[in-house]
Amino acid sequence: MRATTIRMIHVAARQLGLDDDTRRALQLAETGQESLAQMTDAQGEQVLQALKQRGFRAAAKGRAPAARGDTRFAHVLWGKLHAAEAVKVKGAAGLNAFVRARFEKSWGAAPIDIDQMRDARQIAAVLQALKGMCDRAGVEY
């Protein structure tokens, strides 16, 4: 069986709160095989489908969206700036580096990840800086 299918089964079991014994019992009931290593690709897919029927939802590839709308907007602005080639490093890594470089001295410390920020004033300052960059680059937001 493919390693990606095995990983998905383990992620699904963890998401559903299944311990190892319960997961193995499910596998045995669905395929007649207790061990993932002994299953074929089709049997692995069968187990995955059974987990989906029990409520497993696979997350989209990549980074999960930010919990707060204002930090999601910061990601959107950063993506627009990257598409316009106004910034070199795309994605969360570039945005987080920008926040640290721009605000660390004035704030005394900057978060490692913008999605962990909770201070609305600091997030507003980041958004204002990004909007200013968009204005200078001719990017609509």
Image (cartoon, rainbow, N blue to C red):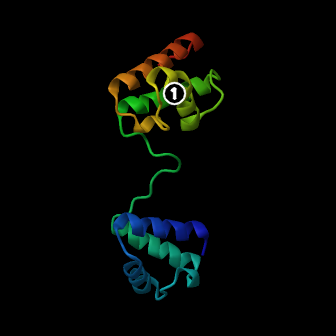
Relative to 99, does residue 51 appear above or below in the rendering? below
Residue 11 to residue 134: above or below: below
Number of marks: 1
Secondary structure of the residue carrying tag 1 is: helix
Q: Quadrant of residue 98?
A: top right
**Residue at the disc numbered 1:** 99
Residue 96 in percent (x, y) is at: 53, 33
| Rendered location of residue 134, percent (x, y) | 53, 16
Q: Between 107 and 69, which is closer to the camera in this rendering?
A: 107
| Vertical position of residue 12 compared to residue 106: above or below | below
Q: Look at 44% across and 21% down and name the residue there.
A: 127
| On screen, residue 72 above or below 60 | above
Instruction: Return the residue nearer the eye: 131 or 93.
Output: 93
Left or right: 5 in relation to 70: right
Of 25 and 92, the residue lying toward us? 92
Left or right: 93 with respect to 31? right
